[in-house]
């Protein structure tokens, strides 16, 4: 089960789309199984995805709130959509993606074991 609000699902779709697209392009250019066998390619995709997710998250979550005034009480009500996935704003998913990339680099270079 995936919980998201607004464009928050892009925190999952951007890395997935970049991974599939890069895998298809790299394998067609360098040959079969190159993408699978290269230890640096997937962490690099996560870092590129983190940059895109951060930029997009900052852009969509910094939109100004819509202010409405209640005619009976004259109180202001602010309406704002927070774009998030699993209650984490979209731009903060870039930190998680970078953490996964660092973990993958360390695991591939045998620093964790």
Image (spheres, rainbow, N blue to C red):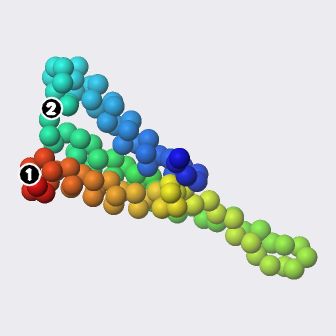
* SS for callout 2: helix
Q: Please say whether residue 29 is visible from this viewpoint.
A: no
Q: Residue at x 22, y 46 (%)?
A: 43
Residue that numbered label 1 is attached to: 110
Placement of 78 over or under 100, stated as above or below: below
| Residue 69 visible in the displayed image | yes
Viewport quadrant of the C terminus: bottom left
User: Closer to the camera, 5 or 104?
Assistant: 104
The residue at which mark 2 appears reads as 37
What residue is drawn where x is 19% and y is 39%? Answer: 41
Residue 73: image quadrant is bottom right
On the image, the x and y values in percent for residue 40 come to 15, 42
Whole-percent x, y for residue 11 in the image: 43, 49
- Give the foreground label among 2 and 1: 1
Q: Is residue 36 above or below residue 89?
A: above
Whether residues under marks 2 and 1 lie with C-beta atoms below 8 angstroms apart, the answer is no
Give whichever of 69, 84 is nearer the camera.
84
Q: Residue furthest right?
A: 72
């Amino acid at each position: 089960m995936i919980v998201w609000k607004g464009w928050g699902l892009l925190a999952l779709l951007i890395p997935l789309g970049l991974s599939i697209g890069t895998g298809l392009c790299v394998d067609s250019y360098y040959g079969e199984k190159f993408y699978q066998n290269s230890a640096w390619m997937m962490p690099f995709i996560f870092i590129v995805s983190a940059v895109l997710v951060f930029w997009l998250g900052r852009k969509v979550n910094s939109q100004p709130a819509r202010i409405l005034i209640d005619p009976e009480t004259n109180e202001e009500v602010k309406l704002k959509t927070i774009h998030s996935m699993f209650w984490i704003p979209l731009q903060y998913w870039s930190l998680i993606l970078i953490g996964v990339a660092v973990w993958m680099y360390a695991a591939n270079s045998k620093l964790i074991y």
